[in-house]
Amino acid sequence: MLARYNTLANCRLYEACAQLSDAERKRIRPAFFKSIHGTLNHIMVGDRIWLTRFEGKEIGSTGLDAILYEDFDQLRMARVSEDERIEIFASNLNDEFLSRKIQYRNNQGNIHTDPVDLLIAHFFNHQTHHRGQVHDLLTQTQIAPPVLDMHRIIRP
């Protein structure tokens, strides 16, 4: 359910952001990742880090503020692919995997061992948290932010 919500919420958010000019998306604003574009890239960075860790691999740090895609259309296409990857990952989750712990090196180089179920919850919460920041940044533009309430997006 959270993977499907993630896809639908990202679709709505990117549709709104696509209405902005590139300069408006990249405008420096009072935000941790400096801009709408920077925050959208950060979500992608986080998703890739966590999915790689869940696969049992180690990923080198790009820095959490890395701009993976300067071009918005390329970022949007990568987002669609990443959301498909997340939905496939989530559809294959099972009790055995969720009961594990994984060890990983964070971006500061520290080694942590944490329960997978907690990290999966963090993974989806991280996306929601930063989508909320983009939603707020959109209120500083002429484009109305989309409705992202889960119960309004996920309906039969």
Image (cartoon, rainbow, N blue to C red):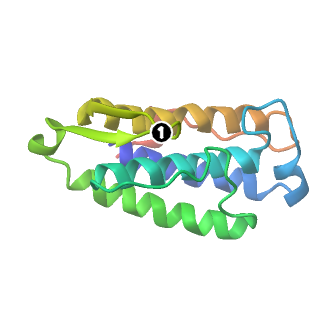
Q: Is residue 32 above or below residue 95?
A: above
Q: Nearer the viewer, residue 132 or 29?
A: 29
User: The residue under label 1 is which amino acid type?
Assistant: Gly
Q: Position of residue 74 (x, y in %)?
A: 66, 70
Residue 154: quadrant of the picture: top left
Taking the spot 25% from the left edge, 40% from the top edge, the residue there is 102
Callout 1: SS: loop
Number of disc labels = 1
Where is the N terminus found, in terms of image quarters? top left
Residue 23: quadrant of the picture: bottom right
Q: Which residue is mark 1?
A: 109
Q: Is residue 91 above or below residue 146?
A: below
Residue at the far left in the pictured view: 96
Left or right of 117 in this view: 13: right
At label 1, counting other C-alpha atoms closer than 10 Å, the crowd grade (few under 14, some 14-19, many 20 or more) is: few
Left or right of 11 in this view: 73: right
Q: Position of residue 38 (x, y in %)?
A: 73, 48
Left or right of 70 in this view: 126: left
Q: Nearer the viewer, residue 14 or 82?
A: 82
Taking the spot 48% from the left edge, 42% from the top edge, the residue there is 153
Q: Position of residue 22 (x, y in %)?
A: 85, 59
Q: Nearer the viewer, residue 38 or 106?
A: 106
Taking the spot 65% from the left edge, 54% from the top edge, the residue there is 14
Q: Position of residue 87 (x, y in %)?
A: 34, 56
